[in-house]
Amino acid sequence: MRRRGIMFVVSSPSGAGKTTLTRNLANADRNLTLSISVTTRPRRASEVDGVHYHFISKAKFAAMRRSDKLLESANVHGNFYGTPRRPVERALNAGRDMLFDIDWQGAKQLYEKMRADVVSVFVLPPSARELKARLERRAEDRGDVIKRRLRNAAKEIPHWEEYDYVLINRDLDRSFRDLRHILAAERAKRKGRSRFVKATRRLLVELKNLID
């Protein structure tokens, strides 16, 4: 019996490191496919369409949401983000794991639709000062945008309690190792469950034959 894939969700405030962690994890793990979100926000100079996000218009985003082509959607910093449904369902049914770089709003929607498939990790920055410094080092946002991201971080961080695991990203290499360990443990758990499902089905058939 093939194990159903895992939806491995990683969330954090902007600047805490989730995007770097998820990209590194996707590159290091052949059985892990990064879910590419659609977004209405403008593309940054360092981003590639179809690699970091699928950059689409607000009209197209609204049409996808109306036709139930999105598993989740959220308004983040005034822009819309969403996860296309089809590639996720196809991967899970084939036993492949999907990796999600999404915020707490998206994670909550995935919980509501597919909680049994979801394993979630919330990444925290080591301090507010370091979070601000990381946003400034990116040199991709204006000062007013950075302030807005910090205000949103204060609203996002309390949602850590809704997640299965929490990491404090003091050191990127250590956080990456911890993330890989979490994924490995969850895979082992799901694989063991699949094996027991098959064994119990066989046992029940044998018992039925004995009883009859």
Image (tube, rainbow, N blue to C red):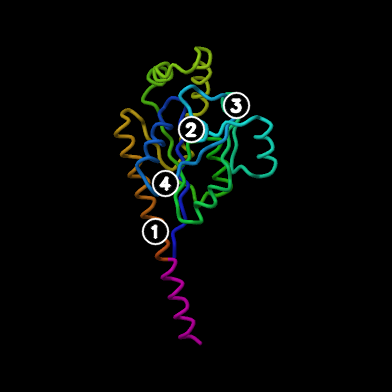
Nearer the N terminus, badge 2 or badge 3?
A: 2
Mark 3 nearby-residue class (10 Å; few <14, some 14–19, many ≥20): few
145 or 206, which is in the foreground? 145
Q: What's the distance in space between the residues labelled 4 and 1, CA to CA? A: 15 Å
Nearer the N terminus, badge 3 or badge 1?
A: 3
SS state under label 1: helix
Q: Residue 52, position in %: x, y? A: 48, 33
Mark 2 nearby-residue class (10 Å; few <14, some 14–19, many ≥20): some
Q: How many numbered circles does the render carry?
A: 4
For the N terminus, the quadrant is bottom left
Nearer the N terminus, badge 4 or badge 2?
A: 4
Q: Which residues are magenta?
A: 197-212
Q: Which residue is mark 3?
A: 79
User: Residue flagged by tag 2: what amino acid is it?
Assistant: His
Q: Which residue is mark 2?
A: 52
Q: Which residue is mark 1?
A: 191
Q: Residue 5, position in %: x, y? A: 46, 53
Q: What's the distance in space between the residues labelled 2 and 1, CA to CA? A: 30 Å
Disc 3 + disc 1, Cβ < 8 Å: no
Q: Residue 67, position in %: x, y? A: 69, 44
